[in-house]
Amino acid sequence: MEKILASDGLEPAGGSPEELGAIIKNEIGRWSQVVKRAGVKVE
């Protein structure tokens, strides 16, 4: 799977549910201002 993702320029996100949760939390923080400025309602 890693070779397939790498061929598309992607990389796996986290090896455990906890790591994936941390990545998601970080991304939410990174994009929150963009979402707010765009007026997107997040549910």
Image: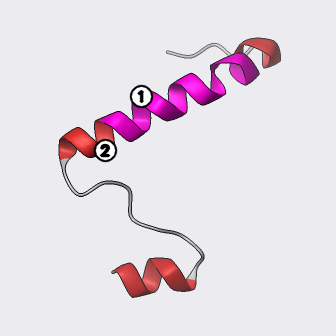
**Magenta portion: prevailing SS class:** helix
Relative height, residue 9 to residue 40 (above, below): below
Over which residues does the magenta segment extend?
A: 22-35
Q: Earlier in the sequence, mark 1 or mark 2?
A: 2
Relative height, residue 20 to residue 43 (above, below): below
Relative height, residue 5 to residue 15 (above, below): below
Query: What residue is drawn where x is 44% and y is 84%?
Result: 4
Residue 21 in which image quadrant: top left
Query: What residue is drawn where x is 38% and y is 56%?
Result: 13
Instruction: Tell whether position 27 is magenta.
Output: yes
User: In the visual, does 39 lie left or right of 17?
Assistant: right
Instruction: Tell whether position 8 is magenta.
Output: no
Residue 25: give its label: 1
User: What crowding class fits label 1: few (fewer than 14 Cα within 10 Å), some (14-19), or many (20 or more)?
Assistant: few
Amino acid type, callout 1: Lys
Q: Element under label 1? A: helix
Residue 41 in which image quadrant: top right
User: In the visual, does 16 lie left or right of 34?
Assistant: left
Amino acid type, callout 2: Leu
Relative height, residue 9 to residue 12 (above, below): below
User: In the visual, does 37 lie left or right of 10?
Assistant: right
Disc 2 target residue = 20
Check the image and tell me how it is coloured.
secondary structure
Q: Element under label 2? A: helix
Residue 25 in which image quadrant: top left
User: What crowding class fits label 2: few (fewer than 14 Cα within 10 Å), some (14-19), or many (20 or more)?
Assistant: some
Query: What residue is drawn where x is 19% and y is 51%?
Result: 16
Quadrant where the N terminus lies?
bottom left
Question: Residue 10's x, y, as percent?
Answer: 53, 70
